[in-house]
Image (cartoon, rainbow, N blue to C red):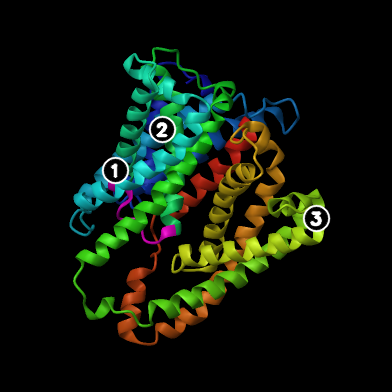
Amino acid sequence: MPAIHANFVYGPLLGAIIGVLFALVFSHRALDRGSGLLWGLAYALLLWLAVVPGAQVIAANLSSSFQTQRDNFPDLVGFMLCFGTPLGLMLGTLGGHRNRATLASISLPRAIIGGGFAGIAGGWAFGKWMEQVNFYQVIAGLVGSTSNMAGNALHYLFALTIGIGFALLFQRDVRGYGSSMAWGMAYGILWWFLGPLTILPLWLGKPLDWSYIHASAEFGALIGNIICGLTIGLLYAVVDRLCVRFLTESDPIRREPEGPGVRFIRTAQWGGLAGLAGGLLYMLVLVATGSLGEIAAIVGGTSSTLGIVVHLSISVLLGVSYGLLFQREAPNLASGIAWGLVYGLMGWYIGPLTLFPATLGNSSMWVPAVAETQFPAMVGHLIYGAVAGAAFWLLERRHNEWLLLDPRIAAREERLRRPLGTAAPALWLFVLGMGVVLPIVLA
């Protein structure tokens, strides 16, 4: 209410109007809790941009006197947790009840096995950072202890619960490995708002602090939650697909039109060419920022020529991984570019913020200062992802059109492709918006 200067009457009334507007626009999109949650979070992000920064820009007539977005960060957290999350879950629950006859049923064993395993693995990845900053003692404080063992046990219990929750929410939406990682990234960002910024201080009896100063102090936890979410998304997709393969009877529609080895080679080739195209354009950013020497340092060199070779080699490998992770995800060029942007942003969090500092022996990773120095790399990764996503879609489309000539193969291909009308656009908006805005505001 302080964000919009509302009182105890006007505030809830405005909230009701916002909720009704959300229901009118997204009632046919929120098919279940998972899709409803994503549409709710995307709606809350757009709402915050329109109500808080937008209103200030209009009031200031585009002058330089309006407040920085750091001052509006508490409002962003409030819009996510008080508008987007409850609206999305409620509308998704109603949508799931309305569409229960047409929706695929949620497999509880798959959710527990796949989600539990993925959650523990994600907790292990997050725990490596927690060990360095003694965060286990903070977690242990939830039960009145200071023991690292108690904090470790609680951490893995939370990770197990979060992993199973991911499976229950998004089991219907998970199709490929890459898109599952994107869903996991969105889930990890949401849990950063819920956990370190909200539940943890309230549980410890501390006053709620949504300021950007406190959020900046929890920047490492943000990266940790994102890495944890990416791990959960990838491993859940692997385990869930194995469960489906082993527990689903064979039928003519599920037969492979081409050998898995042939498909793997073709996808790797398309991805490699797409990654090379993106890497060539990304190289312009590296030349402009003089970062080729840093790339060469990965293999112990200093020359720019070696940096170009290493960069293009990494670009090809990343392109191959993009093809293998995101095949059949993009029904059109626009969605191909969107998935590429998401993949590029993932690469920025995994590469320059995590793997590169670890490779170079930098112990102070996941801090705002490192993110600030790596902003040009974020731009380069987004450019790389957009070009690679578009190029891969163009290369894959020609082959897929040939497969659709056989009606039996067409039925299988349509089943494997992501259809239009899913929550993918909400995912793109939320992940790209938050993944770019949060480091800028906090660093």
Q: Which residues are magenta?
A: 167-177
Amino acid at the residue labelled 3: Val
Q: Secondary structure at mark 1?
A: helix
Q: Give the residue drawn at x 34%, y 82%.
A: 409
Amino acid at the residue labelled 2: Phe
Q: Is residue 152 left or right of residue 343?
A: left
Judge whether residue 439 is colored magenta: no
Name the one closer to the observer, 431 or 443.
443
The Cα atoms of the two marked residues, 3 and 2, are separated by: 43 Å
Work out whether mark 3 precedes mark 2 in sequence or the reverse, and give the earlier one.
2
Q: Which mark is residue 142?
A: none
Q: Which mark is residue 164?
A: 1
Q: Are marks 3 and 2 in contact (CB under 8 Å)?
A: no
Residue that mark 3 sits on: 287
Work out whether mark 1 precedes mark 3 in sequence or the reverse, and give the earlier one.
1
Q: Position of residue 95 (x, y in %)?
A: 27, 48
Residue that mark 2 sits on: 83
In front: mark 2 or mark 1?
1
Q: Secondary structure at mark 2?
A: helix
